[in-house]
Amino acid sequence: MDEILSEMLSEKGQKLIILRNFKFSFHKKLAGDVERWKCVKRLCKAFIKLENGVLVEDQANHVGHAAEAEGSLLRQKISNTLKRRATECISERPAKIIRQEISKCSDGPSVTANDMDRFRKNLSAAKLRTFPKLPKSMPDLHTKFGGFQSSGHTKTSTGEDVTADN
Ligand SMILES: [Zn+2]
């Protein structure tokens, strides 16, 4: 079999195998260095077997779902790689990481400005999660400002609704 297998990371940073735009996650190791990978869709019974990274069995009869669209798969691929990289090289600027990852993809030009925005947001979120917890004094600060921000209107010191005069 000369099927082309590729790899990507899941949203949680786990390795996935891509075969004909279907995603497979590692299931279990079998005898003789054979690995069983199953379709990421929970109710789908499709699976493949790899021996030393080579496809040896293909039971990829997917039920109840279609393959990922090429563009969507590419965006997931870049986005998830970025998340992983953001947690590894915390000091690098997001724009630099995004450029590096896109330049690795042969399909780079199909990434739109919207995609870039989303990548950047994902990346910032991933970075935030890796920072140590805020010092204890921060929640107090947050409570003070939190009350202020959550009121929909701007109140004067006497409690009158400023917008009522307009
Ligand atoms: Zn499937």
Image (cartoon, rainbow, N blue to C red):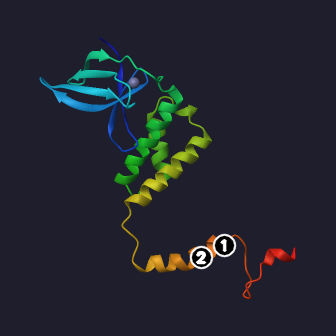
In the rendered image, the quadrant that contains the N terminus is top left
Say which amino acid is labelled 1: Ser
Q: In what element is the residue under mark 2? A: helix
User: Alpha-carbon neighbours of circle 1 within 10 Å: few (<14), some, or many (≥20)?
Assistant: few
Is residue 93 visible from the viewing direction of this image?
Answer: no
Q: Nearer the viewer, residue 97 or 160?
A: 160
Q: Is residue 63 left or right of residue 149?
A: left
Above or below residue 126? Residue 162 is below
Mark 1 within 8 Å of ligand 1, using the beta carbon: no
Q: Residue at x 43, y 54 (%)?
A: 126
Numbered circle sitting on residue 19: none
Residue tagged 2: 147
Q: In what element is the residue under mark 1? A: loop
Pointers 2 and 1 in contact (C-beta within 8 Å): yes
Q: Is residue 6 left or right of residue 143?
A: left
In the rendered image, the quadrant that contains the C terminus is bottom right
Residue that lies at the very extreme toward the left in this rendered image: 32
Which of the four quarters of the rendered structure image does ligand 1 lie in?
Answer: top left
Residue tagged 1: 151
